[in-house]
Amino acid sequence: MGNEGPVLVDHRERQSTIPAALVAAGLDVRLTDLPVGDYVLGPGLAVERKGPSDLGASIRDGRIFDQAVRLQSAFPQAVLVVEGEPRMAQDAWRGAVCRLIEDGFTVVHSLDADDSAAWIARLAKRARRAGPTAPAYGPRRAPRHPSAQAEAMLSVVPGISTTMARSLLSAYGSLAAVAAAAPEGVRSHPGIGKVRAARLAEALHARYVEPADREPDPGRPARGAPAARRWLLLGPDPEDEARSFDRRSVALQALESAAAGTQLVDGLTGEVFATASDPG
């Protein structure tokens, strides 16, 4: 086993055929509880997989944009695998995907689970040949035209893509008119519906709350909040069950008595932090 560590796979992917396909491709695969993402392929590279039904649901409730923020906060390289044909209007899911691409997310469209496995295996093997390239970060240039500014303001609302923002502004004439119409007036607009209308109204009419006083939605991490780090002890035998710790110091103590070849892996990045050696 190399210093790059195994491919970490979230337990939720257990029912998929992909983990077995990765093993068949010669990769060391370990199932564990990942704080963010479905697959950690190497230091700095993670994959989120969305099947046909999951993609539609995550776009409708805005969850996919929260997941994208958390992935990009934790990993220099984050990939979204869109699997199959999403069960929602084509314009809607393509608009959401375009928004993710505009935000710097890498998106791959696979045909099915077998094709997803092939993509993930290829990405994992490439990650082992060359370290990931960190993206260049910097302030984005703010749009100068007032109409582009209005589009940008609407498109930060979960579930509202740039395309949808343009459609709303074209239909109502101005940002103020969209705000005046929300929520009931915009529900009949194509692609909006009850949930998006409520989100628009909340963003445009809700009373401002200071950052220190804001609370995340129940059951959902705060937007942009860092994912909780877990430290994993992975034995030399792929069949060994991973042991998970929330403190590195405790994990290091456990590593001291672990079998030779056991690795301490950062569950957030996939990086191997330490490896147990033979006593003495």
Image: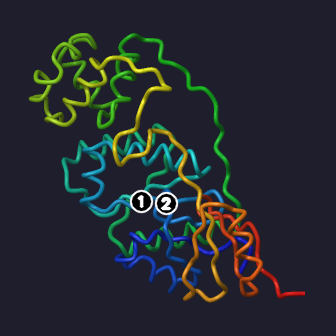
Q: Nearer the viewer, mark 2 or mark 1?
A: 2
* Residue at the (30%, 33%) spot, across then down: 160
| Image coords of residue 128 (percent x, y) | 67, 69
- Marking on residue 45: none
Examine the rendered structure and indicate whether residue 129 appears above or below residue 223: below
Residue that numbered label 2 is attached to: 47
- Marking on residue 81: 1
* Residue at the (38%, 29%) spot, across then down: 156
**In the image as oriented, which residue stretches furthest toward the right?**
280
* Residue at the (28%, 46%) spot, across then down: 93
Examine the rendered structure and indicate whether residue 146 appears above or below residue 121: above
| Image coords of residue 271 (percent x, y) | 68, 64
Q: Are marks 2 and 1 in contact (CB under 8 Å)?
A: yes
- Comparing 263 with 15, the one in front is 263
Label 1: how many residues lie within 10 Å, few (<14), some (14-19) or many (20+)? Answer: many
255 displayed left or right of 49: right
Q: Name the amino acid type tagged 1.
A: Val
Helix, strand or loop status at disc 2: strand
| Image coords of residue 195 (percent x, y) | 19, 37
* Quarter occupied by residue 173: top left
Give the quarter of the figure containing the C terminus: bottom right
213 displayed left or right of 41: left
| Image coords of residue 191 (percent x, y) | 17, 36
Give the quarter of the figure containing the N terminus: bottom right
Label 2: how many residues lie within 10 Å, few (<14), some (14-19) or many (20+)? Answer: many
* Quarter occupied by residue 273: bottom right
16 displayed left or right of 164: right
Q: Name the amino acid type tagged 2.
A: Val
Tell me the CA gap for discs 2 and 1: 7 Å
76 displayed left or right of 254: left
* Residue at the (44%, 52%) spot, across then down: 107
